[in-house]
Amino acid sequence: MFYEGDVLGHGLLAGSVVSWWLGLVLCTTYINFLKINRIQRTHGLFVRSFYEATFIDQSLLLNTKFDIPKFKGENIKYIMYMYYLLGWKLHRKFYQDYESGMARVIVEENLKKETMNTYLLALDGDTDFQPSSVMLLVDRLKMYPEVGAACGRIHPTGTGPMVWYQKFEYAVGHWLQKTSEHVFGCVLCSPGCFSLFRAAALMDDNIMKKYTITTTEAGHYIQYDQGEDRWLCTLLLQQGWRVEYSAAAEAYTNAPQEFQEFYNQRRRWGPSTMANSLDLLGSGRLTVTKNQSISTLFIVYQILNTAASILGPATVCLMIAGSFSFVFGVSPNLALALAVVPPVVYLALCYNLSTNTQITIAALMSIFYAFLMTASILSIIGDMVLEGTFMTPSGLFFISIVSMYLITALFHPTEFHLIIHGFLYMLCIPSGYLLLAIYSMVNMNNVTWGTRECAGPKPAASAAAGAAAAASTQEPVERNVKLERRCKCCRWNLGLQVGEDQEMIEVSPVSAQQAEPVSANHQEPEEKKGHREDPESHWIAQLVEKSRELTLERHDLDRDEVQFWEGLQEHYLKPLGEDVARKRKIEADLKDLRNKATFVYFICNALWLVATFFLQEIGGAVSIQIPKIYINGTIDPNGQIFLDPIGLMFVIGFALILLIQFLAMLWHRIQTLIHFIAFQGTESAAMKKNMKKSYESLQSEKSHEVDDLPLASRL
C-alpha cells in the first residue's frame, strides 16, 4: 500500500510494471524464434517453467503443437476407440448375459436401452471446453432419440492474421451455414474436435462396418481419409440419423497460424467436403426416404450451395474485373481478360512446381489480391456515388452483405467483436476462394495429412549407418533437440541440450579424442540390449516420472481383453504391407482422378466466364433493362441500368441463399435462447438441491459428533 507522496513506492511499482512488460516482450521474442512445431503450447520450451508461471496468458496465446504420431488413415484412432468402448466395454457384457442363459428378447431390449443412453465425446488434444457445454450437447441427445450426433460452437484460438481470418470465417459458418442446416435439415459435418455421438447411431447397420473399410480406390482416399468426421456424418445421415448444432455449447481449439499450414489443412478439407456433398446429393432420393429430417427442398438448397462453391473462382474473377473496369477505365471484356490471367498462370505453375513453392507464390499473390479487393470495394462505393443511388446490382449486393453480417453479429452479442475481423476476411476472399481452390484441386492427389505431423523415427539400421557416416566425415549428427548451447571454458567444452523434457550436459576436454564411429554391427552391452527389448518397462518408467506427485496403481489386463486387442490389431490396426505395385497404381489413380476433377471444376468456371464475356460483347441486345431508382424512391425516366441474364441469375440465387440462412439464424437464436434458459434453470435447481443435501449431511455429522462426546465435555 503506497501513500500520497511516497516517491520510492511509486517508483518501485512503476519499475516492476516496466520489468514485467520487458520480460513479456523478451520471452515472446525468444519463443518466436525457436524452431519448433506449432501447437505444442509451451510443452518443450527452455524457459517453460518460468515463462508459464510469469506470463501464463501470453504462454497460452503462443500455442504450438504437441508431437502427435503420424497415422496412415486418420480414422484409425476412431476405429480403435469405438471398437473398445462400444464393442468391449458395452456390447460384451450383454453377450455374456446371453451366454449365461438370459432370454434373447430381454438381452436385446437391455442392449438397445443402454446404447440409446450411451454417448461418446469426440475431442482434439488441444480442445478447451466447460462441462456445461457437454451437458448442453447431452440435452440434445436426451430430448430427441432420433439425434445421432450433436456439435457445438467452435472458436479458433491463436494469434496472427491467419487466425483473425479464421475467427470470422468460423463465426459466419456457424452463424449462418450450420444454423440453416440445423433448421431446414441436418448438420452435414459434426467436427471431430468437439462433438457428442450416440452409441446406438454408431453401432447401427452400415455405419461402423462401412467406416472401417480399407481404402482401396482413389476416391476413397479423398472422401474417407481426408475428412473422417465429415465421412462419419454422411453415413449417419444416409442411415436416417439426425445431426444437430447447439450454439450455446462452446469449445476452443487451436487453429493454423501459418499460411502454409492453413493451406495444407484446407487442401484436405476442400476436396473431402466436395466428395461427401456429391455423395449425399447422389443418394438424395434414398436419403430423403430414410431420414425424416431431410426433405427434397433441403437437397435443392444443398445443390445451390454446392453450385455456388464450385463457381467461387469465377465469381472472384468477375469482382476483380469490375474493379479494373472502374479504376482504370478499361472496357469490361478487357478487364475480365486481365482478371483471368493471374489465376490461369498460377494454375499452370501448380502443375509444375513443388507444394511449398506453390504456397509461397499463393502468399505473394494473396497480398497483391488484397490490394485489388480494396480497389473492388472502393469501386462499388464509387459506382454508387456516380450513379447517385445504391439501387444498383453491385450496390444492393454489397450493402445487403454488410448489413446482414452486422445484424447477425448483433444477434450474437458475446461475439460481436469478431465483426472487426470481417474487413480482413473480405480482403482475403481471392486467396480463400480462388487461389486456395486452385491449390486444393491441383494437389488432390496428395493424400498426406499436411498438418500436425512430425517426422517419424528412423530405422535402427539407418540411424546407425547415418551415425557412422557422420562420425567418419566429422559432420554433426542431426538430433531431435529443442535447444542447444555450447561454450568453451578453460580446457573444457560445455554443451547444454534440451530435448522433450530432458536435459543432457556434456563435458569433455578440448584435447580429448573424438568418440569412435558407431558401426552397424556394433554390439551393445547386455544390460542395454535387455532394456531395449522391453519397451513396456521403459514406458511405465516414463509414465511414473511424468505423474510426479500423483500416485499410480498398476493394473494388468485380463486374458480376454488382451485377446480382444490382439484381434483388433490383426483386423483393423495392422499396418498395410508395402506393395510397390499397388502403391504405384493408387498414385496413378489419384492423379487420374485429380485430372478429371480439375477438368470438370475449372471447365464450369470457364463456361461461366466465357458466357459473361460474350454477353458483355453483345451488349444491350440481350441485356435486361431496369429503371434507375434513387434513394428517395423517385424513378429517373431517362436512366436505365443494364444487367446480363447470367449475372442477374447469380445475384438472385446468391441472395436467395443468404435470405434462407438469415431466416434460419433468427429461428435458431430463439431456440438457443429457450434451451439456454431452461438449462440454467435446471442447473440452478440441481445446484441448490446438492447444496441442501451437503448442508444436511454436514449437520448430521456435527450432531453425531456431539452425541459421541462425553457428558462432561458437553457440559
Image (tube, rainbow, N blue to C red):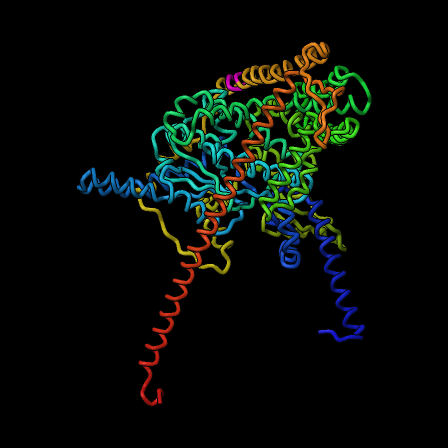
Q: Give the percent coordinates (x, y) of residue 124.
A: 51, 42
**Foreground residue, 111 or 325?**
325
Q: Is residue 252 above or below residue 489?
A: above
Residue extent of the magenta highlight:
585-589
Residue 538 visible in rendering: no
Q: Residue at x 46, y 30 (%)?
A: 231
Q: Residue 526's x, y, as percent?
A: 48, 45
In the foreground, 68 or 366:
366
Write down the quadrant of residue 341 in the picture.
top right
x and y, in percent, of residue 126 in the image: 55, 45
Residue 30, how many percent across, how many down?
71, 49
Which quarter of the figure is the C terminus placed in? Answer: bottom left
* Front residue of 122 and 144: 144
The reply, left or right, for residue 70 in relation to residue 468 is left
Q: From this view, report whether residue 132 is shown above or below residue 274.
A: below
Q: Is residue 365 left or right of residue 538?
A: right
Is the stretch drawn in magenta largely helix, strand or loop? helix
